[in-house]
């Protein structure tokens, strides 16, 4: 039959373990996506990777294989890139670039030959959107998918790590960080490794790399780096920061509102100054408190309060040790505000819960919460990753066993 499909058995396919330029961040023979906001230091980091590859070296605990580098960039000129590679300790005689890269596409007939000619172990495209071609709509999967599949095949045939730099779309509630790159979801889908880069929430001079997707190994730990003279990069240390923390920092920079001035921060702090925990406080009560503290409420309904507390929950936990539970439906708790005691409510309301973790002894209060509330606290605590193993083990005795 002319249209019959060829069928093979997996038992006839020899297993080949993954190969790495730098395990687990940059696989060889695969595509890696590096995403971040404009100006966050993506290109500087890739110049550091070029430097490490040119000589072979270490990225913290990970070995970087030695080999040549080929860079295609339409955002920085060759002189700037050379300066960054040199400043990061690289051997520029091992690093090559394509002149007039703006005229090159992923399917250019000379691309694979250039990789062969330079014997490149690391190939960088900066940014990815510039190399699909003017006729390709990068938002359409049926147009980007075959191009990325071809590029992945080139990476496999030439045994190189191909890295694609991408700008990110704005973070949306409930959307995975893996899918943040501008364009079709097939772009991160085709990548076997995805790294997200952003400024540290606590130090704008420090940049954080978070591993948000890894198809061939366990995801690597987040780590930091700083950018110095001529764009040279110095690798820092491992960190517990996550991509969500980077999103929070990016959103804060875009809003221009300091953390301390956020309405929900001011209200949560005031409530936790006078209470250890509040099992349920309704949205109407939050509105009344806001009107008294701020002159008017920043949110007109419960959805506004819910969205605001969700947006700020990670920072509230990280900076003030205040854990927030969402969309609680029960009778309002007894609590104190402005030195006035509010009696326990009689009707069921929708609201949030708050708990302030000051010390290990305060964790015992968690047992007063319902199972869903304890699960939420556990998730918050695990995300922050307590530095003390003793504290975390103590939490696990109180919290649901399926968390952590």
Image (cartoon, rainbow, N blue to C red):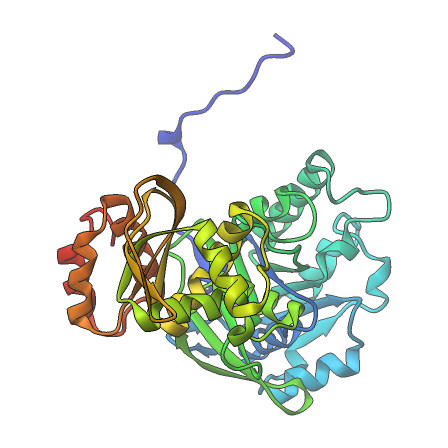
**Is 183 situated above or below 83?**
above
Which one is nearer the viewer's eye here, 300 or 111?
Answer: 300
**Is 72 situated above or below 182?**
below
Name the quarter where the C terminus is drawn.
bottom left
Q: Is residue 28 visible?
A: no
Instruction: Please report the residue visible at 66 percent of the width from the left and 85 percent of the height from the top.
Output: 231
Instruction: Please report the residue visible at 18 percent of the width from the left and 60 percent of the height from the top.
Output: 365
The x and y percentages for residue 59 are 45, 76
Instruction: Please report the residue visible at 65 percent of the width from the left and 56 percent of the height from the top.
Output: 170
The x and y percentages for residue 207 are 54, 76
Which one is nearer the viewer's eye here, 137 or 261?
Answer: 261
Locate residue 103: give its quadrant.
bottom right
The x and y percentages for residue 111 are 75, 55
The x and y percentages for residue 227 are 60, 84
Q: Is residue 367 visible?
A: yes
Locate residue 47: give its quadrant.
bottom right
Instruction: Please report the residue visible at 58 percent of the width from the left and 48 percent of the height from the top.
Output: 188
Which one is nearer the viewer's eye here, 73 or 242?
Answer: 242
How many discs mark residues in the rendered view? 0
**Residue furthest top in the image:** 1
**Residue furthest bottom in the image:** 229
Which one is nearer the viewer's eye here, 120 or 312?
Answer: 312
Q: In this view, does 82 lie to the left or right of 390?
A: right
Q: Is residue 127 left or right of residue 304?
A: right
Q: In this view, does 163 lie to the left or right of 140?
A: left
**Is 71 situated above or below 147?**
below
Name the quarter where the N terminus is drawn.
top right
């Amino acid at each position: 039959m002319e249209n019959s499909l060829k069928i093979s058995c997996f038992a006839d396919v020899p297993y080949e373990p993954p190969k790495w330029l730098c395990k687990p961040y940059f696989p060889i023979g695969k595509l890696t996506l590096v995403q971040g906001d404009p100006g966050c230091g993506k290109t500087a980091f890739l110049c550091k990777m070029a430097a490490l590859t040119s000589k072979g070296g270490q990225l913290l605990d990970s070995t970087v294989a030695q080999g040549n580098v080929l860079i295609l960039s339409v955002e920085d000129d060759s002189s700037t890139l050379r300066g960054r590679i040199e400043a990061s300790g690289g051997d520029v005689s091992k690093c090559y670039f394509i002149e007039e890269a703006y005229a090159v596409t992923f399917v250019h007939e000379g691309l694979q030959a250039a990789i062969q000619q330079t014997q490149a172990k690391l190939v960088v495209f900066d940014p990815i959107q510039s190399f699909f071609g003017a006729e390709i709509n990068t938002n359409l999967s049926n147009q980007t998918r075959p191009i990325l599949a071809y590029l992945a095949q080139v990476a496999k045939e030439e045994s190189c790590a191909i890295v694609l730099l991408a700008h990110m779309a704005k973070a949306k509630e409930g959307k995975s960080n893996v899918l943040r790159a501008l364009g079709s979801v097939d772009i991160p889908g085709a990548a076997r490794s995805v790294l997200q880069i952003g400024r540290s929430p606590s130090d704008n001079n420090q940049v954080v790399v978070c591993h948000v997707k890894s198809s061939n190994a366990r995801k690597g730990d987040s780590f930091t780096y700083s950018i110095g003279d001529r764009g040279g990069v110095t690798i820092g240390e491992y960190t517990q920061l996550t991509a969500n923390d980077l999103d929070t920092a990016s959103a804060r920079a875009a809003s221009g509102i300091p953390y301390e001035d956020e309405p929900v921060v001011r209200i949560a702090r005031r409530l936790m100054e006078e209470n250890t925990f509040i099992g349920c406080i309704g949205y109407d009560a939050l509105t009344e408190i806001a009107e008294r503290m701020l002159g008017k409420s920043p949110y007109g309904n419960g959805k506004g309060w819910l969205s605001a507390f969700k947006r700020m929950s990670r920072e509230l936990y990280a900076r003030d040790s205040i854990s927030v539970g969402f969309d609680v439906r029960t009778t309002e708790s007894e609590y104190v505000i402005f030195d006035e005691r509010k009696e326990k409510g009689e009707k069921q309301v929708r609201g949030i819960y708050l708990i302030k973790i000051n010390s290990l002894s305060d964790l015992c209060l968690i047992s007063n919460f319902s199972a869903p509330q304890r699960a939420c606290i556990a998730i918050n605590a695990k995300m922050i990753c307590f530095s003390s193993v003793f504290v975390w083990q103590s939490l696990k005795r109180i919290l649901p066993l399926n968390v952590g």
